Image (tube, rainbow, N blue to C red):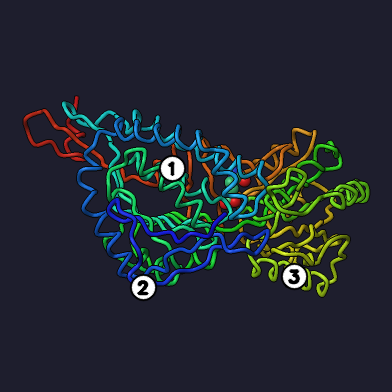
């Protein structure tokens, strides 16, 4: 791929930043530069916000079914270009091609779902406590929304945010992750061609400390949706003040394996959850919480399979595990491996950077991990898995909950009681039974509790709630002043 220079997209035009500076976009499997992107300034962001402000009136007044038709165009165009987009994604982000196709598919799914919402956007009606009075709710856009997205799902997550924001009638300022701006730009090109009017979506690349900060601080931006680290999420909340903020932050997701589990099935789930996307999902399984009776056997089964995993460039069909996103990510996995060793956990495989071009780290497993060790508590966002032994389901749930995060969780068991205890007692936004911690579907709510977020959910109908405001309407056709809470007493 020839490294081209790419621009911002503001007012429906492709424009350079006022800084006249660019940053490099790298292929993590080779370290090669694949593109140059605008190192934007806060003035560029102000320009984008101004553009979003000017387009808000006409876009929000367009009937939602019309906006839905445009979203359907976008979905068709993404589908037509699925293979091309997946290849770009593997080149830019590193995930293996089959997973990159899944990422693009997730964008198609959410876009089609939100297109359909154009003919729903339901409010509700309910009886009034007074006679000759009608009560209902409607949904209205928030206004200008700022979307700040991560690199690990470089097309799916932007789509999760852009599509509900558009269908609800908001206008957008969008800052993609600086590790994957090309995937985001390809999505913008499609949105442009699909007929979304100029200025409705504005795309500005650059750093979190300049571009992100301006989006979050600017008074004209009424809503923020952010997916990324807990630290950044906390700083956004502090800066955003009373804006409507949706956060999807980290995870330290556990898979519980009970003594009655189908171990073959659990093995597939653990491999997929821990090493799929090289462990770089918020929903990745980074802890296996396993019953003491099956621990030894499962550990042997796991080790045999992990040793066979093939690391390499995700474009090659025989690659199981791709690179990490960048050098800092490799250093983080190295750092936590060192911590695990010092804490007294036993490293049974991996633990090293691969001596090859690109940013590769071996699939790594620690056993005899204690719940209070840092490797069992902190998000590593790499292919590093901790095995923790437990005696029964109650201890398993306690250990599973013993982290500041609460995104995804899973239990492998053939026993209904264990399954329901996990469903009801694990503090997480998502629980899987006999399936891994990853693979959320776009028509169900996505998000977590505790340190994972601030209560909002993305996708499905909750995605509509994230990007709209509820208005309550009372229509009094009695022709006289009726007082709620007061006149009710006289109604016969
Ligand atoms: C994330 O890692 O932030 O459930 C999102 C899954 C994917 C989304 C993950 N559908 O693993």
- Residue that numbered label 3 is attached to: 334
The x, y position of residue 476, in whole percent, is: 14, 32
Q: Nearer the viewer, mark 2 or mark 1?
A: 2
- Spatial CA distance of label 2 from label 1 is 35 Å
Residue drawn 25% across and 56% down? 51
The answer to whether 70 appears left or right of 56 in the picture is right
Q: Earlier in the sequence, mark 2 or mark 1?
A: 2
In the displayed orientation, state which residue is furthest to the front: 2
- Spatial CA distance of label 2 from label 3 is 36 Å
Query: Which numbered tag is attached to residue 463?
Result: 1
Residue drawn 32% across and 33% down? 123
In the rendered image of this protein, does residue 245 appear above or below residue 40?
A: above
The x, y position of residue 393, in whole percent, is: 78, 46
Q: Nearer the viewer, residue 313 or 334?
A: 313
- Residue that numbered label 2 is attached to: 19
Residue drawn 75% across and 70% down? 334
């Amino acid at each position: 791929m020839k490294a081209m220079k790419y621009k911002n997209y503001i007012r429906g035009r492709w424009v350079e930043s006022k800084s006249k500076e660019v940053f490099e976009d790298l292929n993590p499997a080779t370290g090669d530069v694949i593109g140059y992107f605008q190192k934007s300034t806060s003035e560029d962001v102000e320009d984008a916000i101004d553009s979003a402000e000017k387009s808000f009136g006409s876009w929000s007044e367009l009937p939602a079914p019309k906006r839905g038709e445009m979203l359907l165009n976008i979905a068709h165009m993404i589908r037509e270009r699925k293979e091309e987009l997946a290849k770009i994604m593997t080149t830019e982000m590193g995930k293996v091609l089959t997973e990159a196709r899944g990422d693009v598919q997730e964008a198609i799914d959410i876009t089609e779902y939100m297109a359909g919402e154009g003919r729903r956007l339901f409010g509700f009606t309910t009886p009034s406590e007074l006679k000759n009075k009608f009560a209902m709710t409607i949904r209205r856009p928030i206004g200008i929304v700022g979307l700040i997205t991560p690199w690990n799902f470089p097309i799916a997550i932007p789509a999760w945010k852009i599509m509900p924001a558009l269908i609800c009638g908001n206008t957008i300022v969008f800052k993609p992750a600086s590790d994957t701006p090309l995937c985001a730009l390809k999505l913008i090109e499609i949105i442009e061609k699909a007929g979304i009017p100029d200025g409705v979506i504005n795309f500005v690349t650059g750093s979190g400390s300049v571009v992100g900060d301006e989006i979050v601080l600017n008074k004209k931006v009424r809503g923020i949706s952010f997916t990324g680290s807990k630290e950044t999420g906390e700083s956004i909340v502090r800066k955003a003040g009373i804006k409507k903020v949706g956060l999807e932050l980290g995870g330290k997701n556990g898979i519980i394996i009970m003594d009655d589990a189908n171990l073959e099935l659990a093995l597939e789930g653990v491999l997929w959850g821990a090493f799929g996307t090289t462990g770089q999902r918020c929903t990745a399984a980074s802890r296996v919480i396993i019953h003491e009776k099956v621990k030894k056997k499962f550990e042997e089964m796991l080790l045999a399979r992990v040793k066979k995993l093939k690391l390499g460039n995700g474009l090659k069909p025989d690659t199981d595990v791709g690179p990490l996103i960048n050098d800092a990510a490799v250093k983080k996995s190295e750092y936590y491996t060192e911590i695990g060793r010092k804490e007294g956990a036993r490293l049974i495989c991996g633990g090293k950077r691969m001596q090859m071009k690109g940013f590769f780290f071996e699939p790594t497993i620690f056993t005899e991990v204690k719940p209070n060790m840092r490797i069992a508590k902190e998000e590593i966002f790499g292919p590093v898995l901790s095995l923790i032994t437990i005696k029964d389901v109650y201890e398993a749930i306690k250990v599973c909950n013993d982290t500041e995060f609460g995104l995804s969780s899973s239990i492998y068991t053939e026993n209904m009681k264990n399954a329901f205890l996990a469903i009801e007692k694990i503090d997480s936004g998502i629980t899987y039974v006999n399936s891994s911690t990853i693979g959320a579907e776009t028509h169900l709510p996505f998000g977590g509790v505790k340190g994972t977020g601030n209560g909002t959910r993305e996708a499905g109908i909750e995605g509509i709630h994230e990007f709209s405001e509820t208005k309550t309407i009372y229509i009094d056709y009695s022709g006289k002043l009726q007082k709620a809470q007061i006149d009710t007493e006289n109604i016969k």
